[in-house]
Structures are given as C-alpha cells and as structure tokens.
C-alpha cells in the first residue's frame, strides 16, 4: 500500500487541481487566452457506431446504446479492463471476482453467476466483431481502442447467439497509412506500474499498412493475509498484524499485431493476431464476523473467522491460501470487406484459444495442505461469418448473413487432502473430475429497414439458429488408504499410491433450435428528435453441468441438464438533441417477460442438505421465471469547448415469479433445520433498483501550448443481492454505495502531444463487497472492493 506520506501528497495534488478550477474558471474566462482548438459540440454528438453492423450516427439508431470513444478510454484511468466500461451505462453491472478473470456481466438485471467452465453469459462480448464465448477470455485489458459500444436488450438478429440481455462490442484501432502512435507509462498505488503503446504506418505505399500495440501492467495487490501457518489457532481473536503479507498481485502482458492490405479500391483485408498472458492471485475471501451465532467449537475450522469483538481491518484476510492462476489467450482473425458495386460483402474468419490454470494449497476454512485443488480449463473456438449488405441510400435497405461456430471446452480438475489431522478427523484423499463440452452452431439471419417517408421507418429482423451441445464426464476417486509419493505434483495419478476407481463416465447430446426476431418502428419528430418502439425476443441454449454426489460410496458425479433461456422485451425510446445540439438527452422505458431464466442455485454448506427431489436443484443450475421493468436516462451536455457534463441514470424493478423450491436445507447459523426455501418473489441478483453515474470535465488553455484538464465522476449503485436463494441473509447482500473519482492533467507540446495525468479512485475510501458466497462454517465469504488508489501517467502521441 502506498505510504501515508505519498497518499496524502497525491490526494493533496489532486484536490488542489480540482478545486482550483472552481475558482479559476470565472477569472480565466475574462482574460485568458482562447481555448485550444477542440471538437465542436456538433462533432461530439455525431458519434458513428456499428451497432446494426453498418456505420450510422448513434442518434439515428433505434436501440439503447452507450458509446465510449477511444479518446475517453485513453484519458480515463478508470477504464483499464473490459468490465470497467459498464460504469458509464445505466442499469449495468460487472465485476471480476477472482483476479482479472471472468467478469459477471449484468445488463438490466440479465446476467449469470455461472462459474462452470462451459458456462455461457447472456451478455455477448465481441472483440472486433468476433464473439468471445469463454468466460476467462472476457476480462482483457483495454489499450489502443477505437471505441466501445454497450447495447442494451436482446441483440440476437445481427449479433447472434447468447445476447439475451445485450451485447458489448470492443473495436480496436485499425492500421493507418499515416505514421503515428503513442506511448504511455503509469505508476501508482499498491506497487502498480505499466506501459502501453502503439505504432502504425505504411509498409507498402497504398497497399499495406501495419499496426503494433503492446500492453504491460503489474501490481502487488492491495490485500493482506494474516495467516501464519497455524494448524489450530488459539481463538478467533488470535490474529496479529505483524503476520501480514501482501496478496492479490497481478502481472499481465498483451500484444496485438495487425496488417491491412488494400489490393484494390474495392477490397480490403485485415489480418489480426492478439495474445494475452496473465498471472496473479485469486481474490482473497474475507469471512464476515457472524453476529448471530458463536463460532463452532473446533478452532481448526476457524481459519478466516474473526470475532465481531476483534474484526479484521478492511482489506485483510485470514486464510490458509488465496490461490493463484494463469490465463493465456491466443487468437486472430481475417476480415475481408469487398464492395461489389453498391453492395458490401464481409467475411470474418476467426480462431481463439484460451487456457486457464488455477491452483490452491489450502482453503479459507481449514488448515494449509488439508484441502488442495487444481484446475486446467483449455478452450478453443472457431467461427465464420458472411454478411451481405445493401446500400442504405434507397427506401429499402437490408443486411443478410450466415454464421458458423464451434467450441471445444475442457475441464480437468483435481481435489485432495495431503495431511492427516486428528482434530478434526481427517484422512488423505484424492479425486479427479474430467469434463468436455463440444458446442456447434449454425445460423442464418436477415434484417431490413423500409423508409415509408422521411419521418417513418420500420425495421424487421430475424435469426434462425441451431446449436448442438455434446457433454461428457468421468470421475476418478482414490479408495482405501491414500498416500502420495510426490506431493509437489500431487494431482498427477502417478503420484497417488491407492486404488483409483473411475466411475460416472457418461455423455449427453442435445440440439437446441430457435428463431428470434425484432420489430422496430421509428418516427422522426424532427431532425433532432427520434422516437421508437422495439419488440424483441432472445434465446440462450440450454446445457449440462456436473455436480458431485457424496452420498454414495465411492462418490459419483451426476449430470444435470438445464433448459434454454427465453425472453420477450418491449421498449419505448426517445433520442433528442436540443439547445443547438449541445445537449443530448436519451430516455427509454422497458418491460421484460422472462418465462425461462437460467439460474445458479447455491445453498449453504454449514449443514448436510438432504435435498433429493428431482424438482429441487440443491447446488447446481436450473431454470426460474420472472420479469424486469425499468427506465433509463442519459445526458450529455457540452455548453462550450471547455465544459462537458454527463449523466446516466437507471431505475430497475425485478422479481422471480417462480424459482426452484429448495427442500431439506440445513442452515444452523440462522436456525434452519430440514427447511424448505421458496425464493419466488425475490429480486434478481446484481440488479440494483437504482444506478446513477454523473460527471463533469473541464479543460482550458493556461498559456500557449499548455492546457489544463480536470474531471470528477461519481457512480452510485443501490442495494443488490448476491444469492437469490438466500436473500434473507444480510451477509449476502451489499447495501447502496457510491464511488467518487477525479483526475487532473496537463497537456503540452504541439496539439497536446504530451500529457501528464493524476487520477484518484474511490476518494472517499468507501468499504463495500463485490461478491459474497453462501456461508461455510461460521460466516459468508466475501470479496471486498478496492480502497482509495492513485495513478500517475505520462503519455506521448506521435
């Protein structure tokens, strides 16, 4: 953690820079030099997007969308990773709860907490128009970006499968025939330091251009672990600050290389290769002190638990081992765009390969080496898309296409106990679980817009999709007396001295066929006011997962199938620009009918749950039903070249009208014995009733060649639940909280070529949880949000 002196100095510089603007602005307005040439208000509102797979002005698109420009991303140090973009969109939520992997995307209450390797999110993530299926490949760093588009609501027609709740499209900067680039170095709190940059230019005049973008970032983590190797701690108050060690470090590198070949005026071919290598700690869990019951009698199980009378400081944990992980993403694509007369043909051929490896030398509730684990999750995907677009100059325009996708996802996981304890009774054990999922889908789609007159247009689109999933599993468990001849590689079967019993070998295959569509009438009340209604359906294929059954001897695996997810949405929207187009104000209201929702049911492991009913899931994935409704408002006001005001507000209501009833639940800490839980009537997870983001940016030339930039942002999220099955447990919810950030920068040199910036996040040092897991033994295991931090950067454009 940054020293108190450094922290106070950075805070002072940041606050001085921000506060000085409030006093200096009216004075500077009178006699300061003219502001540096900047984009006009008109330019700022003419944002061009590809939300409907062709270039259009954002205000002309009858879809709720939020756009982040590459300039905003480059200057705003709050936007570092893919999931950070949701901070600018209403009714959106995303957080990575295990280091820099697997963002939990939620848009308008639609999302998933599925953690299975073959799990699929209902929010589609796209990198340069390529769908990224694997969870662990979706937390990539943002560098050298052209823009990001967040599309709310089902986007199945043009964006394809698994967009029940929306789509997020990340667009990289493409090669240019003009030489240019940038370089940036950063340093900040918690030992953070990094570098990113890009260079582009001509390789063969008029024919071939290239672009190389690189990224590196590392930090030492902001958490501390107080575990000191105790086997049986004296009590829940036995922790000592002197035992602390830093945990939560991250080390990430990424590269993107592109070639743009233009053999003719009507043909361009883009080659893209990208790679990401990440290694870091899994986010440590903090066991919330239990105010309702005393800790269980055996102190060995009190690892991580602290007495309410002597709680740990914020950011501190007391766990045997937090775990570590590596992620490697490799991929590339070839995009061909061919103008055939007035028509445009696009082909995108893509391949992605991902691998997650995670391991732990102990859990947060039992002694080190008493419970070890390891998981390797390889994933490969191939996709091919063909699109033909008509010209958009006539009364009728259309886009039609074909799509093919294939993904192979594996999971090799091991669990073991390497030690023997008498209190509590524990013996050595070993188990191996292997699963494989093959997903193959084909689709055909078309979307057309007919312009009846210069006021009224109607867009109708549909997508026919067929997806086949093949799931296989096997389970191996050691029986009898178990010993290990090589504990350093304990997970390998050759290291186990015992009889290995392989069972539960099974395979299931199922095809899911669907047709989704959207109907969107729109009416232009004036050149600056557009109204629309959108009726759309969404579909997410069903699937399979495995859950361990310890009631048999030896233990077995059970395959569970869950049904497809389906949704029907109704949305009214109004897009406006007033005050000479200086103010952009967009509003939308929506209702979602959600007859089938894929939900992850997680019950407490504090007692033996006796659930055996086929209608109840226990720990696993199943289907619920419900509804969502809400309103959204976004504002963007640029009164002049100096000031920029922005806001995004969302109100949301949600309810599970039908949820799998859980029977035979034992929850001793809250007095439940063989209880029945019916979560119906509860709210959706990670769906706060209110989200609000407001900000103001100011820039002004101080003297020739030197410009001052400053900004303040605040985001608020109302109360949200992390487990719909147990919404009555206050340790599994997060009350409303807000995060304040600010930045101040000096841009100098020709056209602001150089930039020195200081950013502060969570300036009020808000304490909050980003995740909470159903209790084990004494309390809920929670993941904490990052405290106050600062980042100093120096960049140069050329």
Image (tube, helix red, strand yellow):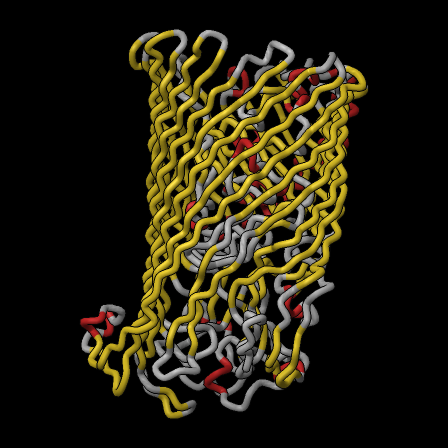
| Location of residue 39 in the rendering, given as x and y in whole percent from the top left corner | 63, 17
Residue 603 higher or lower than 442, as above or below: below
Residue 79 seen in this snapshot:
yes
| Location of residue 56 in the rendering, given as x and y in whole percent from the top left corner | 60, 20
Q: Residue at x 64, y 47 (%)?
A: 567
- 186 sits to left or right of 259: right
Q: Give 749 or 52, whichever is nearer the viewer.
A: 52
The image quadrant that residue 586 belongs to is top right
- 484 sits to left or right of 13: left
Q: Residue at x 63, y 42 (%)?
A: 87
Q: Give 131 or 596, whichever is nearer the viewer.
A: 596
Q: Residue at x 55, y 62 (%)?
A: 622
- 425 sits to left or right of 613: left
- 569 sits to left or right of 598: right
Q: Quadrant of the C terminus?
A: top left
The image quadrant that residue 194 belongs to is top left
| Location of residue 607 in the rendering, given as x and y in whole percent from the top left corner | 55, 83
Residue 375 seen in this snapshot:
no
Q: Residue at x 28, y 83 (%)?
A: 479
| Location of residue 114 in the rendering, given as x and y in whole percent from the top left corner | 51, 58
Q: Give 124 or 296, whichever is nearer the viewer.
A: 124
The total number of labels drawn is 0
């Amino acid at each position: 953690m940054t020293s108190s002196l450094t922290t106070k100095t950075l805070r002072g510089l940041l606050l001085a820079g921000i506060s000085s603007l409030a006093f200096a602005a009216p004075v500077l307005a009178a006699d300061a030099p003219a502001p540096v040439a900047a984009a006009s208000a008109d330019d700022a509102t003419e944002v061009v997007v590809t939300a409907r797979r062709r270039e259009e002005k954002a205000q002309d698109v009858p879809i709720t969308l939020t756009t982040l420009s590459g300039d905003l991303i480059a200057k705003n140090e709050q936007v570092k990773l893919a999931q950070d973009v949701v901070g600018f969109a209403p009714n959106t939520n995303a957080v990575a709860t295990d280091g820099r992997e697997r963002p939990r995307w939620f848009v308008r209450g639609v999302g998933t907490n599925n953690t299975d390797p073959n799990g699929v999110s209902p929010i589609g993530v796209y990198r340069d128009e390529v769908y990224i299926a694997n969870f662990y490949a979706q937390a990539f760093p943002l560098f050298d970006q052209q823009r990001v588009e967040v599309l709310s609501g089902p986007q199945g027609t043009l964006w394809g499968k698994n967009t029940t709740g929306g789509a997020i499209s990340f667009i990289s900067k493409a090669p240019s025939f003009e030489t240019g680039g940038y370089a940036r170095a950063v340093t900040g709190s918690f030992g953070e330091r990094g570098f990113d940059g890009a260079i582009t230019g001509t390789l063969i005049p008029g024919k071939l251009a290239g672009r190389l973008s690189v990224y590196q970032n590392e930090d030492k983590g902001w958490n501390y672990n107080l575990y000191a190797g105790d086997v049986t701690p004296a009590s829940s108050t036995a922790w000592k600050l002197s035992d602390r060690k830093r945990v939560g470090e991250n080390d990430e590198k990424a590269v993107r290389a592109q070639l743009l070949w233009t053999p003719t005026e009507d043909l361009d071919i883009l080659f893209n290769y990208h790679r990401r290598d990440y290694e870091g700690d899994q986010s440590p869990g903090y066991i919330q002190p239990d105010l309702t019951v005393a800790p269980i009698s055996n102190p060995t199980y009190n690892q991580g638990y602290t007495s309410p009378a002597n709680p740990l400081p914020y950011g501190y944990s007391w766990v045997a081992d937090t775990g570590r992980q590596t992620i490697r993403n490799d991929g590339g694509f070839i995009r061909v765009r061919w103008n055939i007369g007035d028509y445009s043909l696009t082909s995108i051929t893509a391949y992605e390969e991902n691998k997650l490896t995670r391991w732990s030398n102990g859990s947060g509730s039992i002694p080190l080496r008493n419970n070890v684990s390891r998981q390797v999750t390889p994933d490969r995907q191939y996709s091919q898309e063909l699109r033909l677009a008509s010209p958009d100059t006539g009364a009728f325009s259309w886009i039609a296409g074909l799509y093919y996708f294939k993904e192979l996802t594996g999971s090799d996981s091991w669990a073991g106990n390497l030690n023997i304890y008498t209190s509590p009774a524990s013996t050595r054990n070993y188990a191996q679980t292997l699963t494989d999922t093959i997903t193959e889908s084909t689709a055909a789609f078309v979307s057309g817009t007919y312009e009846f007159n210069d006021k009224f247009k109607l867009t109708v689109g549909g997508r026919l999709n067929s997806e086949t999933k093949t799931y296989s599993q096997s389970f191996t468990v050691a029986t009898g007396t178990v010993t290990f001849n090589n504990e350093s590689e304990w997970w390998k079967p050759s290291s186990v001295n015992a009889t290995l019993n392989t069972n539960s070998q099974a395979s299931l295959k199922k095809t899911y066929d669907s047709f989704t569509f959207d109907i969107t009438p729109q009416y232009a009340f004036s050149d600056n006011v557009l109204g629309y209604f959108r009726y759309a359906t969404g579909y997410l294929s069903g699937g399979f997962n495995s859950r361990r059954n310890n009631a048999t001897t030896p233990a077995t695996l059970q395959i569970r199938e869950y049904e497809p997810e389906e949704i029907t949405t109704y949305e009214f929207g109004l897009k406006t620009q007033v005050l000479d187009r200086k103010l952009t104000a967009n509003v939308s209201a929506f209702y979602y009918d959600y007859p089938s929702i894929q939900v992850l049911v997680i019950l407490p492991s504090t007692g033996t749950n006796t659930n055996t009913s086929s209608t109840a899931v226990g720990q696993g994935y199943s289907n619920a039903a419900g509804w969502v409704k809400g309103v959204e408002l976004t504002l963007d006001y640029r009164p002049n070249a100096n000031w920029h005001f922005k806001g995004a507000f969302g109100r949301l209501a949600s309810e599970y009208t039908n949820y799998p009833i859980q029977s035979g639940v034992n929850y001793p800490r809250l007095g439940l014995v063989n209880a029945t839980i019916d979560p119906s009537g509860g709210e959706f997870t990670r769906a706060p009733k209110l989200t609000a983001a407001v900000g103001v940016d100011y820039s002004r030339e101080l003297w020739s060649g030197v410009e001052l930039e400053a900004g303040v942002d605040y985001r608020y999220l109302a109360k949200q639940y992390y487990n719909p099955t147990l919404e009555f447990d206050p340790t599994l919810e997060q009350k409303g909280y807000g995060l304040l950030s600010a930045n101040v920068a000096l841009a100098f040199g020709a056209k602001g070529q150089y930039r020195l910036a200081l950013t502060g996040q969570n300036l009020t040092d808000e304490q909050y949880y980003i995740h909470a897991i159903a209790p084990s033994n004494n309390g809920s295991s929670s993941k904490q949000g990052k405290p106050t931090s600062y980042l100093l950067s120096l960049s140069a454009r050329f």
